[in-house]
Image (tube, rainbow, N blue to C red):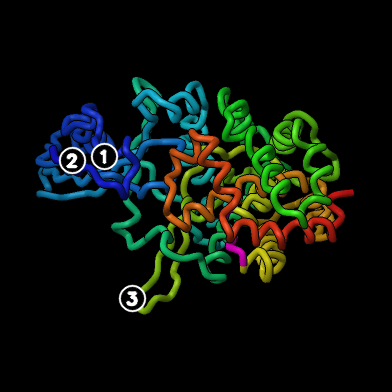
Amino acid sequence: MASTNNNNDYNADELIAPKWLSAEFFREVLSQHLKEPELKVLDVVMSPASAKGDHYASVMFRSKVVYETQKGKFSKSLIIKTMPEEEGHKKELLNNSKIFETEIGMYTKALPKFEEILRQSGDETKLCTQCLYHSLEPRQVMIFDDLVVEGYTVIRDRRATIEELKAAYTKLAKIHAVSFKILNENPDDLKEFKNSITSMPNILTDPFMTSGITNFLGLIDSVPEFAKYKPYFKNIEKDIVQQFIDIIDEYRSNRQSDAYYILCHGDFHLRNMMFKHNSTGGLEDCMLLDYQMSNVCPPSVDILYSIYMLMGPDERRNHHKELINFYFNTFVETLEKIAFKGELPNYVDFWRQLYRHKIFEMFYLTLLPMPFAAEARDIDLSQMMTSNEVRKKLFFIEKYVEEVKYLLPRFEKLGYFK
């Protein structure tokens, strides 16, 4: 079995595959999946499955497996997703979390059911790649078909186009719509999706989550034109994380009679999706990835997050309402198509709910330095996650400061600071 050599383009914990990812392990996986008990693995080549900074809440490998059955000799490229085994911040952060239970449930139950409901209405949309194998014991692991082989790629060297963003919002809107129908007609079918980021026992007290507003106040103190906003941010400094939690857990702890609820993606950013283009560059498909944070919550959890973690500055300034309206129209059109029996969501009420959850925008404002840093490629994700000194510096990235100069007056105009 071969493994990749050290390479600065990859996460350090994905350079060398663990020993249990052996030829025998892949023989068991493929023989079970293909129902070929006599299958023999001839060769396995391991490499990292993603680039540095693509993700943090898992460890991922690509495995090219050559195998033989009675039908002949074949090769298959697989993506292996597992929990970190190396001691350190990543393992501590994810310890005792339910993220693999959630993602296994999404790939094996929720998303296939959603696809079936869409197909019954004549919609052949594919919502996820196939999960070939999953296990929680003796270790948490999922194995998928490799979408790269099918022509999908992750966008890393540029921002997504409006067409690509609309493709992503289309997939999200259809997931939201089918889940909205189920929650209104058979809510018990989604009752297992209750473990959000707030259920991760170590993350809510982690400095990565708690230091953002304090670091943002440091920026406010350094830019004279921001001074008038300081009292507001100082006022929410102590409870912004709790308000963030309250919105995500609203369906379970404080359900509102006039609110909309869906099964969210939970981490809807550009590195958690792949795009397929044809030979002339035309867009064919978008596939959403990484459903570890999926839970039943308001749609604002995904929508407001996407304004800061999916859109770039131009989209935030010039197209964000157009894109959100596109999402909402697709959401409602899908509900009509799948014969939703209740009252359709109302445009005004939907935007009112986004406004009610405006604290999300304040919280995501403190995360916005991350995509600017990733774009600059001078700091890796593990440094951002583990060092507050590194995070403090990110708040002074020139492009981020310019974005804040646009966003704070916009928030003021919308009445967010009242």
Q: Residue at x 52, y 52 (%)?
A: 115
For marks 3 and 2, give the CA distance.
Answer: 31 Å
Residue 3, which numbered label?
A: 2
Of callouts 1 and 3, the N-terminal one: 1
Q: Nearer the viewer, mark 1 or mark 3?
A: 1
- Front position in the image: 84 or 178: 84
Callout 3 crowding tier (Cα within 10 Å): few <14, some 14–19, many ≥20: few
- Point out the residue furthest to the right here: 418
The structure residue drawn at horizontal position 71% and vertical position 42%, both measured from the top left corner, is: 217
Q: Amino acid at mark 2?
A: Ser
Q: Position of residue 50 (x, y in %)?
A: 35, 48
Q: Secondary structure at mark 3?
A: loop
Give left or right: position of 87 versus 173. Answer: left
The label nearer to you, 3 versus 2, is 2
Residue that label 1 marks: 15
Q: Is residue 377 left or right of residue 293?
A: left
The label number, if any, that marks residue 279 in the structure image: 3
Which stretch is magenta? 309-313
Please say if 40 is above or below 270: above
